[in-house]
Amino acid sequence: MKTVSILPFGVKENDDERLGKIISACRDAGYDVIMPASLPHPEGVSTIDGDGVTPESSVVISVGGDGSVLYAAACARPYGIPVLGVNTGQVGYLAELSDGELNKIAGILGGDYKIEERMMLEARVTVGGELYLKTAPALNDFVISKSSVSKIASIELDCGGDDAGRFDADGVIFATPTGSTAYSMSAGGPLIDPSLECICVTPICPHSVMARPSVYSASSVIECREGDWRESGLLLVRDGLETVPLPKGAVVSVYASIEKTRLVRVREGGFTGVFRTKMTGR
């Protein structure tokens, strides 16, 4: 029996109608449904412990906003399973379906869809030349930010031995093209077609007119360190899902991952048209 994993982050315990429609559509397409035991689920639905995704899952359906899609993508990535997002949030740029399009699920599971592979980033942290940690891949971005609201961070960037920038700021964002529509956009970064592969570096509230967003090739390795070590207080945040305090003297290297996120797509139209529709509702 083919299996679908449903991760209903955007479904409240009293919201059985939406979840029931999704489950019925999956079963109509000939799929069994599994869900995480820790999340709201109707009686009679198979559940498993953990994140609710198994290697046998054909598709992961995320129900919620873009944050839910990011979490679902992290769960599905080790198995190469595609993710279908159902938006119950506000913009839901990563999600493919809205509440009014649940009738499309059966057709999608029947094969009426295409897969978009999206570039991801990884980060490696070293201290004194020794590996401190290596992160899981990020679909949207890595953010290096200060841990204290009242302080400003001194940021130094290096790309292949080239001094890529030095500035005082609240932090810096390393975004994929997918993540260019998220925090990076809010911080003044460019919008990038997600079919491209590159790394966008966007300073957060820089205290310099010369610190501007930059775009680097996907083959680049960009190193970031805190320029003033009188105090250490930087954080490394992956996709808003994981936060790691950086020790004094840490060097963060950000680079393209060999892994990809696979997203289910059914909409026609290019990047700008979909983005405009999501942002304006028309």
Image (spheres, rainbow, N blue to C red):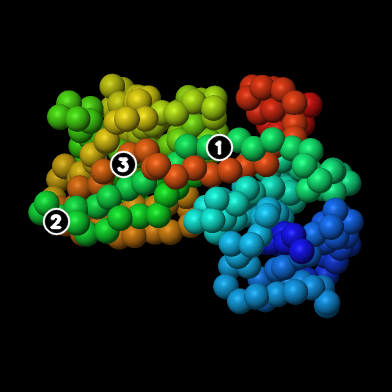
Number of the label disc, if any, that sits on residue 117: 1
Verify CB contact (< 8 Å) between mark 1 and mark 2.
no
SS of the residue under disc 1: strand
The residue that mark 3 highlights is 254
Alpha carbons under labels 2 and 3: distance apart: 16 Å
The residue that mark 2 highlights is 130
* 179 relative to 173 in the view: left or right: right
* 22 relative to 83 in the view: left or right: right
Identify whether 268 is placed above or below 152. Answer: above
Classify residue 16 by image quadrant.
bottom right
Q: What x and y, as percent, mark residue 145?
A: 34, 48
The residue carrying pointer 2 sits among few (fewer than 14), some (14 to 19) or many (20 or more) residues within 10 Å by Cα, namely few
Three-letter amino acid code at the position of disc 3? Val
User: Looking at the rendering, in which quadrant would you find the C terminus?
Assistant: top right
Q: What x and y, as percent, mark residue 146?
A: 31, 50
Alpha carbons under labels 1 and 3: distance apart: 20 Å
What residue appears at the point 27 percent right and 35 percent down from the top-left corner?
Answer: 221
User: Looking at the rendering, in which quadrant would you find the N terminus?
Assistant: bottom right
Alpha carbons under labels 1 and 2: distance apart: 33 Å
What residue appears at the point 47 percent right and 50 percent down from the top-left corner?
Answer: 239
The residue carrying pointer 1 sits among few (fewer than 14), some (14 to 19) or many (20 or more) residues within 10 Å by Cα, namely some
Three-letter amino acid code at the position of disc 2? Glu
Note whether residue 166 is visible.
no
Name the residue nearer the viewer: 232 or 139. 139
- Nearer-N-terminus badge (1/2): 1
- Nearer-N-terminus badge (1/3): 1
